[in-house]
Structure formats: structure tokens, C-alpha cells
Amino acid sequence: MSASEQKASSIPVETVRTGDFSMRYFRFGRGKRPLVILPGLSVQSVMGSADAVAGAYDLMAEDFTVTVFDRREELPGNYSVRDMAEDTARAMKELGIADACLFGASQGGMIAMLLAAHHPELVSRLALGSTAARVDGSRSGALDTWLRLAESGDAAGLYLAFGKAVYPEAVFAQLRELLIEMAKSVTAEELARFSRLARGTMGFDAAERLGDISCPVLLLNSADDGVLGTDGADDIIRILGDRPDFTVHTYTGYGHAAYDTAPYYKERLYRFFTA
């Protein structure tokens, strides 16, 4: 995040430090209950959009204190989703967050699954959006394209390919020029970071750990997911579908980014977390 972005935001971005890494986060809301949001993979960090995120989740502000985490700052050479989950758990513990409602979208949902499975004391309710329990060859096409563009230094091509895969066609058409403009501010360091985080998703498989999740689960799925495919959530539904504390809602026509574009999305999260 640039100095100008940080200055423009009314919500401060803070840093939690553990023994061997640091992680940025921001907070909003005034409620007594903790809610953690883990965003998906993005070309530039969501830390530069703190005000926009807080505005989108304003419904939660009265009942929850919301913490939005980035990925760790010091990325190792190989950084898997499992590593991301363990680091996020350590950051939560460092900040004294436990028994929290947890929402993860896309790659953030993958992190959230493992976090809830490995650290049940940290998660009281788990919501997953536009995610998958595994990323094999049939679900890595978008990632392959993004990696090729990022590693060739084509920020504009990456932003356009990202937007085309994530958003419905009509929304992408409206955002096209904005995405091209946003790409002008992307640095070589951001492209390298994006590539490393994207590579961490390749080969992800948490299917065998889903049964270890002990808290209620809400899955908000997308039937026209252009990133993880229309069957991306099938494993989650197959493994958790018979549980009475598992709920699924499938959106159609809103793409992978249903968490940004679909109606009543935040209301469904709120009802689940306050049930």
C-alpha cells in the first residue's frame, strides 16, 4: 500500500508481529463479538481498500469487531495455503482473538477451512464463499493464466484476465477501464508477491480435513464460477452436506466474485453469524 493510500484511508492499517513474521490487518466495528475476514487472492493488497471493505460490511459493525487480515509480509520461497492458515492462526492468537466468526472468500476460504480444522478453539462459526476444497488440474486454468502474466510483468493483462475470470461479463465490461487504470500503479514487487501467493494455491487439497471442522458451516457457492469451476464446491457439499449444522446457498449469474456482486450476500452472512 502506498503512502497516499494509507493517508486517504480513515481506518488505520496495523501490523501484528510474531517471532518470525509480521502480518498487516485493519479493524472496524464496535461489537463485542469477534469476526475475522480472510479475503481472496488479489493483485494488490486489500489493505489499501480498508474504507471500502468496512463500508461493504457495515451491517456487521454494530454486533462485531471485524478484523481483516492480509497474508504475512515476509513470504518464504514456497508458501502453501496450509502455511497461510498456520500464520493466520498465530496472528489471531497474538491479537487475543478466539472463538471468532470466520469468513473466507476464494483463497481466503481455503485458508479458513484449514484454520477451522486445525484450530477449533479459534473459530465458532465458519462461512465460506466461492471456494473449493481442492485445486487440481481442472481448477487451475485461471491461476495458470494469472501466473504467466504476472511473471512476464504484464500488469494490465493480469488485471484484465483477473477481472474477466472473477466478474460476470456485464460487470467486467463496466470495470474494464478502471482495471486498466489500476494496473498502472502495480509494482514489480506486487507482481512477485502475487505470483508467490498464487503458486501456494496450486495443488491445494483440504478434503480429508473437512471432517475435522466442528463448528457450524455456511457455504455461499457460485454456479457460474469462472475461477474454480462450477463444481468447485462439490467436495465441500459431499463431505459436509449431511450435517445439520451445514447450510449452502448457490448464486447464479454473479460469477466468482458473488461476495462482491450478489444481492443479500452480507445479509446471509449476518444471519448466519448471529443465529
Image (spheres, rainbow, N blue to C red):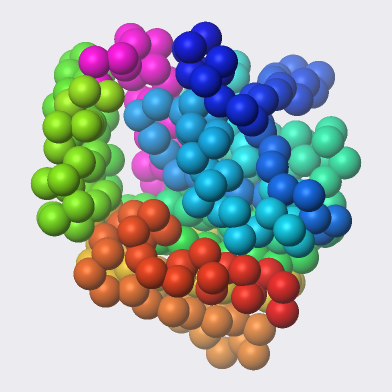
Relative to 83, is 128 above or below?
below
User: The C terminus is located in which quarter?
Assistant: bottom right
Question: Is residue 138 in sight in this rendering?
Answer: no
Instruction: State which quadrant residue 120 falls in.
Output: bottom right
Q: Position of residue 226 (x, y in %)?
A: 22, 56
Q: As rendered, which of 80 and 150 lies closer to the eye?
A: 150
- In the image, residue 235 lies in the stretch drawn in magenta: no
Q: Position of residue 143 (x, y in %)?
A: 27, 40
Instruction: State which quadrant residue 254 falls in.
Output: bottom left
**Point 45% across, 44% down: residue:** 40
Q: Position of residue 188 (x, y in %)?
A: 33, 10
**Point 45% across, 71% down: residue:** 264
Q: Is residue 16 left or right of residue 179?
A: right
Instruction: State which quadrant residue 85 falls in.
Output: top right
Relative to 196, is 80 above or below?
below
- In the image, residue 204 lies in the stretch drawn in magenta: yes
Q: Is residue 266 left or right of residue 96?
A: left
**Point 19% across, 57% down: residue:** 168
**Point 40% across, 26% down: residue:** 44
Question: Is residue 249 in sight in this rendering?
Answer: yes
Q: As rendered, which of 157 and 142 lies closer to the eye?
A: 157
Q: Position of residue 191 (x, y in %)?
A: 33, 19
Q: As rendered, which of 254 and 241 lies closer to the eye?
A: 254
Q: How many marks?
A: 0
Q: Is residue 42 left or right of residue 102?
A: left
Relative to 203, is 170 above or below?
below
Q: Which residues are magenta?
A: 183-205
